[in-house]
Image (cartoon, rainbow, N blue to C red):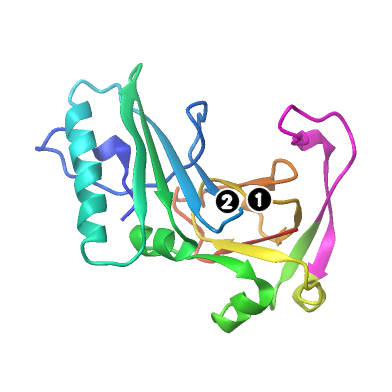
Amino acid sequence: MKIKMAALCMASVAFAMFSACGSTDVTENTVELKKDGSIVEYTVEDFSASYYDADELETFVNAEVESYLSEHDGTIKVSRNEVEDETAYLTLKYDSADTYADFNGTECFSGSIVQAQTAGYDFEQDFLDVNSEDGDESDEGSVSVEETVIQADVPGSVVVEDDDLKVLIIQCSTNVVVPGKIQYVSADSSVDVQGTDTVVVQADADGGTSEEPVYILYK
């Protein structure tokens, strides 16, 4: 049920669905996994067309969330839903990866490798070993993309031997932030490591999401 803001306009225009994450300063769609397993999804979309209606956007989003919660377990909170300077900002807070996946109709899992395997996810693939070099850090402690080094492929059989690893498995085209230092990511050309805790999952050639979910392993 991803809410696509570009389609949230006058009643005569069909509503579509989309994704996002971050804070009031976020300028791109992002999904952030928190330490407690909850997920914050920030969406930032252009809202400059004359037929877009901010009040209708707010009503629609609230109605979609309320409708979902009336029929499903889990918690979703709309913490921001407004238009400023012809840009629409939507922040949704999900109590778990399961709720995020169910609401958006996509793949999303968070937990240990053993829990992922129990849930049916396999690690029979190659992963990129990510090592962040020491260097200048921002106030938030993140390392610039120039300081991030991607090494050779590592087989999944090696990755699963590290009991300290946690994994976020997600299928979407967005920025993704995890609550730790990334160690491995799926060996997929759509995955671009941007720092110690951030990757960008790029859209496929048709502008859609990849057919396979992306694995992000971190400590």
Residue most extreme to the right? 134
Q: Residue at the spot x=17%, y=25% of the render?
A: 51
Which contiguous range is marked in magenta? 130-154
Q: Residue at the spot x=70%, y=73% of the render?
A: 125
Viewer-proximal residue, 165 or 185?
165
Q: What residue type is disc 1 on? A: Pro
Any magenta on residue 119? no
**Residue annotated with mark 1:** 179
Q: What residue type is disc 2 on? A: Lys
Expressed as whole percent of the image width and height from the top left, the position of residue 60 reads: 20, 42
Local secondary structure at mark 1: loop
Any magenta on residue 145? yes
Question: In 3D space, how far apart are the residues under numbered discs 1 and 2 (Cα atoms)?
Answer: 6 Å
Q: Does residue 68 appear in this view?
A: yes
Expressed as whole percent of the image width and height from the top left, the position of residue 59 reads: 18, 38
The number of numbered discs placed on residues in the rendered structure image is: 2
Expressed as whole percent of the image width and height from the top left, the position of residue 72 reads: 28, 67
Q: In which quarter of the image is residue 112?
A: bottom right
Left or right for 38, reference 91: right
**Residue annotated with mark 2:** 34
- Binning the other alpha carbons within 10 Å of mark 1 as few (below 14), some (14 to 19) or many (20 upward) gives some
Expressed as whole percent of the image width and height from the top left, the position of residue 71 reads: 22, 66
